[in-house]
Structures are given as structure tokens and as C-alpha cells.
Image (cartoon, rainbow, N blue to C red):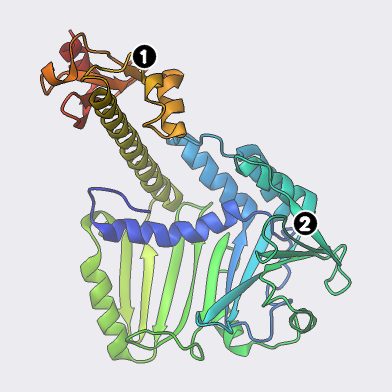
């Protein structure tokens, strides 16, 4: 998530935390009934990390804050997300060593009443085209058009998975041998890291990284922390390094990269070989929602400016082929514009102002097209005869058009 016009460190920090929150919002197809069961009860023997997400409070908090701040949720299947999150409860994503070049793989282990039909319904409402799950037998499902994609194993149908448990992962990872060993490992290093986590928080993470070959300039032993997204932004992340010099070096780099906005919100402490990052106060979800809405707004602005730029190119290409005459309407540019751009332009969201004279006789600041003014507030995108596109206030554009 990048917020244009601001120091990138704020966006990077927001993106890091939002990934943990979004895990509970957009992967709510897997979850637990919400019981206080030991999350390690079904841990793979070789697990070195876990991300634990209680889906309902995370989904409710994020969606409520986005609505409060006026986010454009568009066609997002909000009702289906909340319904599925309520059925889910808790998701545990275990990190395990991978056999490929990337050293980390993951498997989501869940206790839930969610069926493959529930998950398929969420997939359908989340996309433009209907999506389906293909039944591979013995409780195994995968995307119908991508059999090498992720696999879901539904415990109520699978002979090798306990009823009420769902597994998510790839085929290379979810072998029968791997599944049969679930819950048989002690994972003492991971259990030790989990002890430093407030396990009642909706989102928490823990990882023991001592045995993982990470390409880092300093040795990291473990990472642990929590985000109480439903409780006013409480949270803490602790990174334990292999030595104090490494911790001091990273602490200095992180402290120096924080912009003033983030520094007001985040406290960073160095104690021995441990760097701790925690919010100073305020609502964490509110801050992240604000960052996401601003990023969304900027992305939309870039898109509409780009579309108007395409229209300007199309108008001049039309003129080249028609003795410098302007097109009678935007529909005449069908051979020059992409179908999505043409559809949005002819749907009433934009206005084309056909000039009276030929294109080569127009002043550079003559308006050729702009976003519709009805109901518009703030700024609108405007296309000029010289091909440039600018954002103008509604009031200034009205003056220019007169």
C-alpha cells in the first residue's frame, strides 16, 4: 500500500500491519469456532511460526471503520464477508520450511463449520465472473480452472482430517504423510515464543527463526506480538536478535526511517538484543483505514487521469484520419480506446465537449472532456486540447467553461 506524496516509511509500516488485519478479513473462508482451544493442538511437527487471526472481530472492526470514514467499498461482498467471518472464528496459519528456493511455506489449519459451498459462494461474490471449486475426492477441493492451485481439505468429508477441521495449502505441502503427522510435534521453540504473546488478542503472530536460513545481514532469533484491532489499537511486536550489536543496528535504521507522522503513533524501544515496536495510543484500525482510503483515492485519481489521457490520444488519432476534425462523440473512438475505458466514458461519468472548429485551431487550454459535474465535490479531472490532463476544482472548471 503506497500513499503518494508522503514518506514511504509510513506506508510500509501501515502495509505491514494491514496484512495481518486483512488476513482475517479476506481469508475468512478458514476459521475456528471461536473456542479457546490450544492453537498448537494441530501444529505441524516442523512448524516454526504461527499467525493467529480471530476473524469476526477483525472483519467487523475493519468494515465498521471503513464505513465510518466513508470508504468506497464498491462491489465488495461485505455481507458475505461478515457472514463467513461469523461462521469462521479463528484461523491459524503455520509457517513451515519449504522444499523450494523460497525458504518459507504455509498451511492454514482451521476448526470451522464452513463448508466448501460456503467458500465457493464467497469466491463467486468476490469476483466479476462465477468461480467454482472442483471436488477431487476425499474432502479435497481446488479452483476448477487451476488444479495446480491451492487445495482445501474439508474434514467432514476427508478420512485423514478430523471432522470440523479445514486445511488450506498447496499440493506439495499437504501430502498424506504431512497430514498424518499434524499435532504430533512438540514445537518447544515455538511454544516458548508464543508465551510472550497476549493470546486473547484478535490478531497475533509468533515465529522462532533460529533454524531458518534467511538472507539477512543480522541474525534474527524470533518475532512475536499482537494487534488488538477491536480494542483501541493495543499491540506490541518484539524482534529478538542474535546479539545486541545486531539489535542496535536495526533499531537505529528503523528509527531513522520513520517519518514524523508514524513516529507520533509508534514507539520503538531497544533493550538488550530485543527491539519492541508498539502503538503509543489511538485506534490502530482507524489509522490503517485512513491510510487505505487515501491510497484508494489516489489510485482512483491516477486511473481517471490515465483514462482521460487515453481519450485525448484517441481524439487526436481520429483527427489525423479525418482531416483534423473532432469526433462527433466518444463512441466514434471505439477503435482507439479499450472497451472498459469506452464503457466508463459513455456511461455518463465523463462529458465530451465537441469543439466547433478543427482540432489544430483550438487553443491549448480548450476543454475537450471532463468528469461529470453533477454531484461532484472537490476536484475533477479535465482533458485539454493539447492532450494534457489536470485536476481542477468544480468551481474553477465551471468558470472556465463559461
In the picture shown, does residue 326 fall above or below 185? above
Q: Looking at the image, which residue is at 27% across and 48% down?
A: 4
The part of the image, by quadrant, that contains residue 356 is: top left
* Front one among 309 and 316: 316
Q: Is residue 377 left or right of residue 128?
A: left
- Of marks 2 and 1, which one's residue comes earlier in the chain? 2
Question: Percent position (x, y) of residue 334?
Answer: 41, 27
Residue hosting label 1: 374
Q: Is residue 196 visible?
A: no
The part of the image, by quadrant, that contains residue 257 is: bottom left
Question: Percent position (x, y) of residue 375?
Answer: 37, 16
* Front one among 70 and 238: 70
In the picture shown, does residue 35 fall above or below 125? below
Question: Percent position (x, y) of residue 331?
Answer: 41, 20
Q: Looking at the image, which residue is at 38% across and 88% down?
A: 219
Label 1 environment density (alpha carbons within 10 Å; few <14, some 14–19, many ≥20): few
Q: Looking at the image, which residue is at 53% across and 40% down?
A: 64
Label 2 environment density (alpha carbons within 10 Å; few <14, some 14–19, many ≥20): some
Locate the C terminus and report the quarter of the image it occupies: top left
Q: Is residue 112 left or right of residue 137?
A: left
Q: Looking at the image, which residue is at 50% across and 36% down?
A: 73
Q: Is residue 388 left or right of residue 22?
A: left
* Front one among 91 and 127: 127
Q: Is residue 338 visible?
A: yes
Q: Secondary structure at mark 1?
A: loop
Residue hosting label 2: 134
Residue 294, label in figure? none
Amino acid at each position: 500500500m503506497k500513499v503518494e506524496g508522503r514518506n514511504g516509511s509510513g506506508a510500509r509500516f501501515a502495509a505491514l500491519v494491514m496484512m495481518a488485519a486483512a488476513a482475517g478479513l479476506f481469508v475468512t473462508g478458514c476459521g475456528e469456532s471461536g473456542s479457546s482451544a490450544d492453537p498448537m493442538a494441530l501444529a505441524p511437527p516442523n512448524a516454526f511460526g504461527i499467525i493467529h487471526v480471530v476473524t469476526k472481530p477483525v472483519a467487523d472492526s475493519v468494515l465498521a471503520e471503513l464505513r465510518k470514514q466513508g470508504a468506497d467499498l464498491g462491489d465488495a461482498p461485505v455481507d458475505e464477508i461478515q457472514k463467513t467471518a461469523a461462521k469462521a472464528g479463528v484461523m491459524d496459519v503455520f509457517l513451515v520450511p519449504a522444499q523450494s528456493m523460497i525458504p518459507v511455506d504455509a498451511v492454514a489449519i482451521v476448526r470451522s463449520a464452513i463448508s466448501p459451498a460456503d467458500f465457493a459462494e464467497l469466491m463467486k461474490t468476490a469476483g466479476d465472473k462465477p468461480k467454482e471449486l472442483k471436488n477431487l475426492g476425499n474432502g479435497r477441493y481446488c479452483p476448477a480452472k487451476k488444479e495446480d492451485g491451492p487445495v482445501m481439505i474439508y474434514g467432514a468429508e476427508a478420512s485423514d482430517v478430523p471432522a470440523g477441521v479445514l486445511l488450506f495449502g498447496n499440493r506439495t505441502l499437504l501430502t498424506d504423510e504431512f497430514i498424518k503427522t499434524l499435532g504430533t510435534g512438540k514445537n518447544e521453540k515455538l511454544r516458548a515464543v508464543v508465551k510472550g504473546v497476549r493470546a486473547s488478542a484478535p490478531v497475533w503472530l509468533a515465529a522462532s527463526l533460529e533454524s531458518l536460513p534467511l538472507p539477512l545481514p543480522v541474525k534474527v532469533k524470533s518475532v512475536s506480538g499482537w494487534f488488538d484491532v477491536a480494542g483501541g489499537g493495543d499491540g506490541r511486536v518484539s524482534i529478538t536478535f542474535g546479539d545486541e550489536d545486531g539489535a542496535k543496528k536495526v533499531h537505529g535504521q528503523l528509527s531513522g526511517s520513520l517519518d514524523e507522522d508514524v513516529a507520533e503513533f509508534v514507539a520503538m524501544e531497544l533493550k538488550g538484543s530485543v527491539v519492541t515496536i508498539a502503538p503509543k495510543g489511538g485506534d490502530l484500525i482507524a489509522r490503517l483505514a485512513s491510510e487505505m482510503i487515501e491510497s484508494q483515492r489516489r489510485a482512483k485519481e491516477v486511473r481517471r487521469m490515465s483514462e482521460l489521457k487515453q481519450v485525448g490520444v484517441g481524439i487526436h488519432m481520429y483527427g489525423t484520419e479525418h482531416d483534423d476534425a473532432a469526433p462527433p462523440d466518444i463512441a466514434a473512438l471505439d477503435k482507439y480506446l479499450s472497451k472498459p475505458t469506452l464503457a466508463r466514458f459513455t456511461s455518463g461519468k465523463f462529458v465530451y465537449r465537441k469543439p466547433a472548429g478543427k482540432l489544430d485551431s483550438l487553443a491549448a487550454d480548450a476543454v475537450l472532456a471532463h468528469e461529470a459535474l453533477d454531484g461532484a465535490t472537490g476536484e475533477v479531472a479535465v482533458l485539454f486540447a493539447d492532450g494534457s490532463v489536470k485536476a481542477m476544482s468544480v468551481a474553477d472548471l465551471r468558470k472556465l467553461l463559461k
